[in-house]
Image (tube, rainbow, N blue to C red):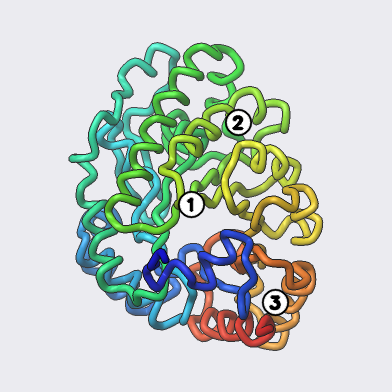
């Protein structure tokens, strides 16, 4: 009879496999971050990129958050754009403006200077963060690795940072589909290698963040993005659950499910029950409380948690999360209360 490690039968892993659980597992995107006084104190001493490249500190901030919140899973503390540095893009981080690519891809010819991620040696600090986080984490809790999805990475690379309308990205996509396909294919190969590296280093599951995909129409997503996301997910080592998460456009949910993954992340712009119908009964779902709710009073938080759980209706395969990351203004006690409330109200 096969013997599994303790995390294998954790509530999170069972939900990802759509198996019954004693309660609904919960974790939070950005569960380690600026809303925590300890994190803010650390950031006064260490810049964001310096923190991400320090495995000991990165592991510490996540382990502190897991212990403080009582969540059912940890996620590697890192940034989705770090993968672009060894591919030839110059990344800086401004506390006001966020990440900035100093040498963005603006013309089709620029795609040629984006190198292949042939080996993971330049990102070994990320792998060490995985190893240290796993070694310090309770054996009963799974650790999630993560990466940006090809479209979101491409958008950052082309725009040079965050964008309201992604016009440069769409212009390249629509005007030169050959260059676009080359860019996305190269990123897809890199992301798959990166995620598999995190799994080899000790992660139990991975999440693919397509933070900017919501700017696309279903037609453009199907034509220009879906094949590359599909390629990433197909290349992930078998046996590790894959969470596929995008924000901003519920119309894309059926396409996210078509692209693959075991769990489809849902934001707050659609009810969880409606989202699950769009995703289909053969997938688990993750979500989907509006992060702003955590700025409200305890009774409102409780009411909103109950609504999400009622929409899930006790079906196997629900992982509770926010529809995006914890906001910096969130009181820590509200995040703790959220986790306790989910556990209490969902107890079978």
Q: Residue at x 37, y 69 (%)?
A: 5
Residue 119 found in image quarter: top left
**Location of residue 81 with respect to 173 vertically, above or below:** below
Between circles 3 and 2, the one closer to the viewer is 2
Q: Residues within 10 Å of mark 2 (few under 14, many from 20)?
A: many
Query: Quick one: label 1 or label 2, which is nearer the N terminus?
Result: 1
Question: Is the C-beta separation of discs 3 and 2 under 8 Å?
Answer: no
Q: Nearer the viewer, residue 302 or 313?
A: 313
Q: Nearer the viewer, residue 196 or 68?
A: 196
Q: Residues within 10 Å of mark 1 (few under 14, many from 20)?
A: many
SS under mark 2:
helix
**Location of residue 112 with respect to 19 vertically, above or below:** above
SS under mark 1:
strand
Residue 318 screen position, x and y as percent: 65, 65
Residue lying furthest front: 1
Classify the position of the C terminus by image quarter: bottom right
Residue corresponding to mark 3: 305
Q: Nearer the viewer, residue 107 or 289?
A: 289
Residue corresponding to mark 2: 226
Residue 202 found in image quarter: bottom left
Residue 182 screen position, x and y as percent: 44, 18
Residue corresponding to mark 1: 207
**Location of residue 136 with respect to 185 vertically, above or below:** below
């Amino acid at each position: 009879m096969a013997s599994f490690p303790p995390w294998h039968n954790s509530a999170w892993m069972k939900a990802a496999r759509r198996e019954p659980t004693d309660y609904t597992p919960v974790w939070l995107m950005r569960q380690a971050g600026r809303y925590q006084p300890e994190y803010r104190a650390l950031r006064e001493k260490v810049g964001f990129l310096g923190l991400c490249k320090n495995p000991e500190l990165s592991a510490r901030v996540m382990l502190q958050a897991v212990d403080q919140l009582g969540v059912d899973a940890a996620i590697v503390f890192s940034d989705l754009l770090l993968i672009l540095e060894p591919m030839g893009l110059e990344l800086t981080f401004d506390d006001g403006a966020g990440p900035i690519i100093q040498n963005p891809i603006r013309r089709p010819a620029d795609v040629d200077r984006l190198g292949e991620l042939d080996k993971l040696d330049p990102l070994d600090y990320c792998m060490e963060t995985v190893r240290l986080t796993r070694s310090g984490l309770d054996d009963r809790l799974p650790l999630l690795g993560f990466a940006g999805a090809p479209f979101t990475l491409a958008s950052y690379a082309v725009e040079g940072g965050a964008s309201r309308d992604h016009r440069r990205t769409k212009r390249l996509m629509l005007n030169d589909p050959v260059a676009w396909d080359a860019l996305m294919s190269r990123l897809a190969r890199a992301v798959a290698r990166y995620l598999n590296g995190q799994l080899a280093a000790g992660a139990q599951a991975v999440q693919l963040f397509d933070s900017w995909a919501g700017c696309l129409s279903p037609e453009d997503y199907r034509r220009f993005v879906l094949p590359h996301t599909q390629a990433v997910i197909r290349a992930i080592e078998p046996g590790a659950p894959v969470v596929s998460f995008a924000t901003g456009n519920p119309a894309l949910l059926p396409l996210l499910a078509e692209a693959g993954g075991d769990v489809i992340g849902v934001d707050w712009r659609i009810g969880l029950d409606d989202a699950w119908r769009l995703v289909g009964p053969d997938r688990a779902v993750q979500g989907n409380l509006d992060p702003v709710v955590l700025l409200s009073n305890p009774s409102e938080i409780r009411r909103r948690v109950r609504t999400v759980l009622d929409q899930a209706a006790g079906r196997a395969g629900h992982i509770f999360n926010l529809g995006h990351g914890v906001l910096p203004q969130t009181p820590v006690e509200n995040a703790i209360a959220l986790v306790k409330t989910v556990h209490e109200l969902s107890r079978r």
